[in-house]
Image (spheres, rainbow, N blue to C red):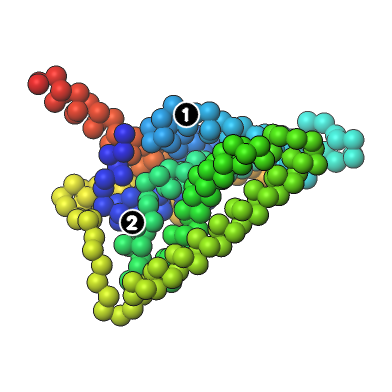
Amino acid sequence: MNEFKTYHPIVNFAYFAFVIGFSMFYMHPVCLAVTLASGFVYSVMLKGPKAIKTNLLYMLPTMLITALMNPAFNHEGVTILTYLPSGNPLTLESILYGLSAAVMIVSVMCHFSCYNAVMTSDKFIYLFGRVIPSLSLILSMTLRFVPKFTSQLKVVTNAQKCIGRDVSNGSLLQRAKNGISILSVMVTWSLENAVETADSMKSRGYGMRGRTAFSIFRFDKRDAAALLCISFLGVYVLVGGVAGGMDFRYFPSVKATEPTIYTVSIFAAYFALCALPIAVEVLEVRKWKAIRSKI
């Protein structure tokens, strides 16, 4: 299911800009829960059931490490639970802040994985190629580096395994040598790929004034409606956050803003914004099933 991916690049970019930006700055527990749940569900929709295992493999260790590190180094807070062997207090506020920071980091990582699946390099260059050509090319190469590196690493590892030179064969010293050999191959491939991409774009006249480019992206009524909806929800949440409707304090004691109809509407708008691609995918599936039932 990739219906949201078929929208115009400006729609995809606006969505991720709002959601990832809000995820990094709004530490209210409700916002964190909504962001984590929406990012996890949408990544599973994009990548299939295998994404559940992949997400949990990096989500759980990251959350655990971050949640444990903060109370070990941060001793602020008025609610003292006990004292560490070093004599520093272990406070409830530091534990809660560590958990919140862990959820925030994992949520951002989850949404960035969705961003890499939806916002391809050609979409990014289409949006910013004429405005900031050099920077857009560098950012595009940077954002797609990890997926391409992972894919190439599997190819190289499988090739080395076929000739008995992977990290699972031989003694410990031999395994280390094989690992260094694979790392050397990957570093060489990365540098060559960067140089080839730069030369290719230069030979095509990328960044030159007056250069034209073919594009398959067309902004239609569906994109206009989606962009209007994302903009309205994003601005509404932003204004509500600036007005203090989503404030949440962890130190020196835990305190949240009093719930009102206005604050509830802000959280509702935030939920609608984060769940927008999920709703698009669900509606498309229902539409497709309805069409098939009529055949």
Could you say where residue 244 lies in the image, as x and y percent from the top left? 48, 50
Query: In the image as oriented, which residue stretches furthest toward the right?
Result: 86
Query: In which quadrant is the N terminus drawn?
Result: top left
* Label 2 CA crowd tier, 10 Å (few <14, some 14–19, many 20+): many
- Element under disc 1: helix
Dot 1 amino acid type: Lys
On screen, residue 230 above or below 284:
below
Label located before the other in sequence (2 or 1): 1
* Label 1 CA crowd tier, 10 Å (few <14, some 14–19, many 20+): few
What residue is rendered at 37% in x and 52% in y? 120
Tell which of 47 and 168 is nearer to you. 168
Dot 2 amino acid type: Lys
For the question of whether residue 59 can be seen, the reply is yes
Tell which of 55 and 206 is nearer to you. 206
Query: In which quadrant is the C terminus drawn?
Result: top left
Which quadrant of the view contains residue 41? top left
Say the numbered circle drawn on residue 123. Answer: 2
Say the numbered circle drawn on residue 50. Answer: 1
Query: In the image as oriented, which residue stretches furthest toward the left?
Result: 295
